Amino acid sequence: MNAPVTPEVAQKILADFFAEWVQALDLTILSIDAGHVLVRMPLGVHLARMGGIVSGQALAALADTSMVLAAIGNCGEVRAFATTDLHTQFLRPGVGTAILCHAQVVRAGKALVFTRAGMTQEDDNKLVATATATFFAPQP
């Protein structure tokens, strides 16, 4: 395991290793430690769907990206984690200034990493969506 991943290092990992369309979400890593991450996604018209609520696609991408970052924080290094399963539950329309995603590693085995996330509205802390994912973790 390498040195702990800081929010600044995680932000650089996001910029260097994630697709441009993920970077277009304008995510900010607020905190990260061994197996936990808190990510902020500001809301705007580019993420809104009919009715002015955040699109489910943006929430799923936020969750997937945050859970990968939690896995990176857990192992302490960048790996080519591959999403093998992603399940998202949309609980209420997301509105306001931003969505916060709290993601954590539930269990990290030799080949698979199991994660979960909760997404809340920044303005009132209401739960908008939850997600779980499994990642294949290639050995370095």
Image (cartoon, rainbow, N blue to C red):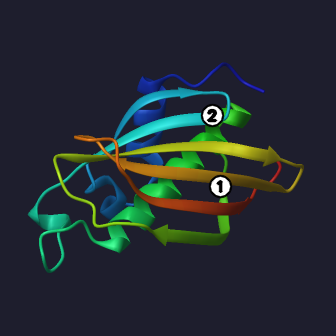
Q: Position of residue 84 (x, y in %)?
A: 70, 71
Q: Residue at x 66, y 56 (%)?
A: 81
For badge 2, the amino acid type reads Gly
Q: Secondary structure at mark 1?
A: loop
Q: Position of residue 38 (x, y in %)?
A: 46, 36
Q: Residue at x 48, y 57 (%)?
A: 63
96 left or right of 21 in image:
left
Q: Quadrant of residue 71?
A: top right
Q: Please give the label number shown on residue 92.
A: none
Q: Residue at x 72, y 24 (%)?
A: 2
For the N terminus, which image quadrant? top right
Disc 1 + disc 2, Cβ < 8 Å: no
For badge 1, the amino acid type reads Ala
Closest to the observer, 11 or 129: 129
94 left or right of 7 in image:
left
Is 112 drawn above or below residue 50 in the view shown? above
Q: Secondary structure at mark 2?
A: helix
Q: CA distance from mark 1 to mark 2?
A: 13 Å
Q: Nearer the viewer, mark 1 or mark 2?
A: 2
Residue lying farthest to the top in this orientation: 3
Q: Do we see residue 63 in this rendering?
A: yes
Q: Position of residue 74 (x, y in %)?
A: 70, 35
For the C terminus, which image quadrant? top right
Q: Residues within 10 Å of mark 1 (few under 14, many from 20)?
A: some
Q: Please give the label number shown on residue 73.
A: 2
Task: Compare marks 1 and 2 and give the one earlier in the sequence.
Answer: 2
Q: Position of residue 37 (x, y in %)?
A: 53, 36
Label 1, on which residue? 80
Q: Do we see residue 140 in this rendering?
A: no
Q: Residues within 10 Å of mark 2 (few under 14, many from 20)?
A: many
